[in-house]
Image (cartoon, rainbow, N blue to C red):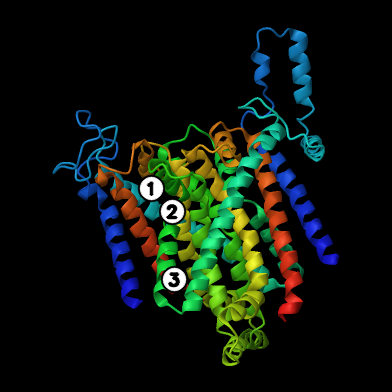
Amino acid sequence: MFRLGKHVARILLTVLLGGILGATLLRVAPGFGVDEEELDSRLNDQSIRALRQEQQTDTNVITFYFRYLGRMLHGDLGISRTLRRPVSELLRERLPETAKSVTLSLALGWALSFALVILALMSRSWSVDLFGSVISGFLLCLPAAVLSVLFVMSRAPARLVLALIVFPNVYRYVRNLLLRSASQPHVLMAQAKGLGNFRIMLWHILWPAAPQLLALGGVSVSLALTAAIPVEALCDLPGIGQLAWKAALGRDLYLLVNLTMVVTVITLLANSASNLLGEAFRPSAA
Amino acid sequence: MKWARTLAVSLLALTAAACVLADVIAPASYTHQFRAEPDAAPSRQHLLGTDDLGRDRFSRLLYGTRVSLLLAPAAALLSSLLAALIGGTAGFRGGRVEKIVMSGTDLFLSLPWLFLLITVRALMPLNVSPIVSAAITFLLLGCLGWAAAARVVCADARSLRNSDFILLARASGSSGLRLLWRHMVPNLLPVLLAQFWISVPAFILTEANLGMLGLGVAEPLPSWGSLLREMQSYPSLAGNPWRFIPLLLFIVLVSCFQLVMVQEELPA
């Protein structure tokens, strides 16, 4: 319970600090306090004065922070300057698309990594290990954006790109973790006692490495979310990565800062969940 | 693996030499447009052909590689120095200072790296020269890439702080600064060097991603990002294979850095 409380406190603190950082970024950005609506020729002097009055309330830094954080806590993330729509509405629209891509990529990337590592371990074949290492090494040398363009050019399913970005990063760690786990004396003892390969793999190699694998799971969520920017932007997938790219090109800081906050919260939740799950595994592993 | 590392270092040295001598080797300036020959095939005059604007692709490749090979290590050096300063101080001081600094580092690590980078990049003024935009891009990479390295440095500094030889140095009257400079820094160098080599390919890859998204180094200054961005205008993978030579060289260079990095990681 204490650990759960610690994780929740950490997330809240990050959101608070992130909010302050975000508000500062917005405050120092060029063009802050200027409203394009003032240029509307249909507005009379009174309306323009009202608009300026509204902007005046944000000139005090402290007031601005509290107003910004207060609005954020009430789910009001502001209006996107480039798309002229509420940020929360844009997030509701785009998040499911990214969630779908990220989930699929994580499932595929992890499955491929596990399949190759387990195959190499069970068959004790150096060629499978070499194949996995060469493929992952090659993919690590390719920028996500290049991989996306290559997929678009070859008309391959764009969602697979994210899986190919997750795979090499996960593969290296999974390989090292499971190789270390497989070289432990208790595994040798289990083999000497004549236990089956499957049983050894499940209970003597995978189970002890579960906390580290779960921690890696949390990190891979962050990796996939970050890679979503170039992939969605270049493969034309309407997710939050593409939204972040458009916001960066249009210098839409309200949108960018809020997107960064949302992705940070998702990352923290994933990391905390994986850490808590990992801690649950630890006593039985010991 | 020694031969692989020698090969990687030789290739990197050869490329670096070619880039330094770009003014002599390149057949044209990276901005010069051969307007009669846009998108030309390789020839004696243009070894890798020309791009859509008629600029010599080989010259742009040389100058672009120079930008990345010069600025990515500079950014890596900056992030390693920041990591040494922040992580080293935290590990050396220990106690509350370490806890506070490492909590801050953890919070920084929680922020999604590319999202944060494009947010800060979007804050930068638009009316800057290409050289300044290149410097800003790599400066941001250097300033934002210290956190993971700082954790490693902090852990190493902590174990050094508790080691016997530091205790002996303290007992013989070494002051804080002398301890830091004479005993801690030389022992932290292998870790810092490993972090440096890890950062260089990571920064080159990030700049390439940013450049392909139009958020990196501004035209007409070439960089890996802008060179690879050309790929977006190709209709298919088939035909005109010379257009993929920059990509091939990019993969070779990053692989070389990865190979050097693997060797550097071992002593750490």
Query: Mark 3 or mark 2, which is nearer the start of the sequence?
Result: 2
**Pointer 1: what residue?**
B224
Above-or-below relation of A31 to B155: above
Quadrant of the frame with the C terminus of chain A: bottom right
Q: Counting residues from the N terminus, which is met first, the one under dot 1 or under dot 2?
A: 2
Name above or below for residue A12 compared with residue B54: below
Residue B262 circle label:
3
Question: Amino acid under label 1?
Answer: Trp
- The structure residue drawn at horizontal position 71% and vertical position 69%, both measured from the top left corner, is A278
Q: Which residue is mark 2?
A: B204
**Percent x, y for residue A16?**
77, 48
Which numbered disc flags the more N-terminal residue, 3 or 1?
A: 1
**Discs 1, 2 touching: Cβ within 8 Å:** yes
Disc 2 secondary structure class: helix
On screen, A188 above or below A247? Answer: below
Residue closest to the far right: A1
- The N terminus of chain A appears in which quarter of the rendering? bottom right
Callout 1 and callout 2 share a chain? yes
Estimate how packed mark 3 is, as few (under 14), some (14 to 19) or many (20 or more) residues with alpha carbons within 10 Å.
some
Q: Amino acid at mark 3?
A: Val
Q: Quadrant of residue A238?
A: top right
Q: Is residue B202 left or right of residue A30?
A: left
Q: Chain of mark 1?
A: B
Give the alpha-carbon distance from disc 2 to disc 3, as whole Å. Answer: 17 Å
